[in-house]
Image (spheres, helix red, strand yellow):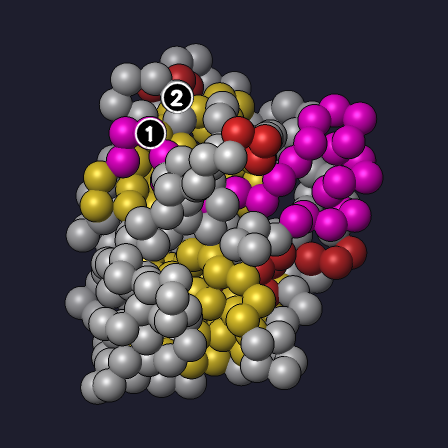
Amino acid sequence: MMRRKLFVCIAVVVLALVMAVPAGAITKNWVNDFDHPFVGLVVFYDESGQFSHRCSGSLLDSTTFLTAGHCTAGVGSARVYFQQDAGANFDPATGIDPITGYPETCAGATLGVVCATSDELYDFDFANGGFPNTNDVGLLILDQPIELSEYGELPSDGELDDLATARGTNDTIFTVSGYGLTLSQQPHNGKPNTSFRSRLMAESTLVNLGSALTDGFNLQTQGNGDDRGGTCSGDSGGPVFLGDPNSNLIVGVTSFGLNTICRGTDFAYRVDRQEVLDWINSH
């Protein structure tokens, strides 16, 4: 199951308002993301080494990988793939992508080049988060450095604060990137979900920063409409960039949505808060 549920810290409070579900893949008007080579597909394993789930995330330097707290909490180890089509050739019959090794191994000659392992995982006290402050940030420290020409950039404290009251915020562009589902079907209709397991991106616009669902901790964006796209299962932990696809400035990590079929608005946990930045930089 590719989607991990956001447990009690979100569900108990949100149930009276909406059903919050972990966010996943890039939907609607997406394009292949060749602009952010530091965005990776991360696979998690339990303490016995069995596949658990997958998420997305971003390298901040050669060994520090930023993702969501609900992705890293309660797992034993991880492997990160940085190929744009990391799992695109997945064969259900064998359970593996023969080109990259996803989700079990790093293909030959890729370890420390475009693939890395990690058994040093952290979350921002996710289990004790409430709502809307879910503490939904996670980190991996890679065992092998991945040397790239560019990495994701962290924002300054309060980078988004001016947008909370500014007029015309629906003109503010964000770019989301990840490896999740591209089409999630209703469970009862019998149709398969669509997942390319490739790094995709799309532009979205700001909804608000100060509602009961955001309250200064989350960023709510809209992926519906002309030339826009959103997130779905498997995109959790992926970056939300402030600006168009040329931007590397990460202001949030994809966190949750309001329904299981990835329609409507998306929510990211903001990283432009001093306590979050201090926690990230402490590792």
Q: Which mark is residue 224?
A: 2
Residue 124 in the image: above or below residue 171: below
Q: Which residue is mark 1?
A: 28
Above or below residue 57? Residue 231 is above
Asked whether residue 87 is in view, the answer is: yes
User: Can you tell which of label 1 and label 2 is closer to the viewer?
Assistant: 1
> Marks 1/2: CA distance?
8 Å
Secondary-structure class at tag 2: loop
| Residue 220 marker | none
The answer to the question of whether label 1 and label 2 lie on touching residues, with beta carbons closer than 8 A, is yes
As helix, strand or loop, the secondary structure at mark 1 comes to strand
Which residue is rendered at x = 79% and y = 48% of the image?
8
Say whether residue 281 is visible: no
Q: Position of residue 194 (x, y in %)?
A: 38, 42
Mark with earlier residue (1, 2): 1
Q: Which amino acid type is shown beneath numbered disc 2?
A: Asn
Whether residue 16 appears in magenta in the rendering, the answer is yes
Q: Residue at x 34, y 17 (%)?
A: 225
Identify whether 152 is placed above or below 6: below
Question: Residues in magenta?
Answer: 5-30
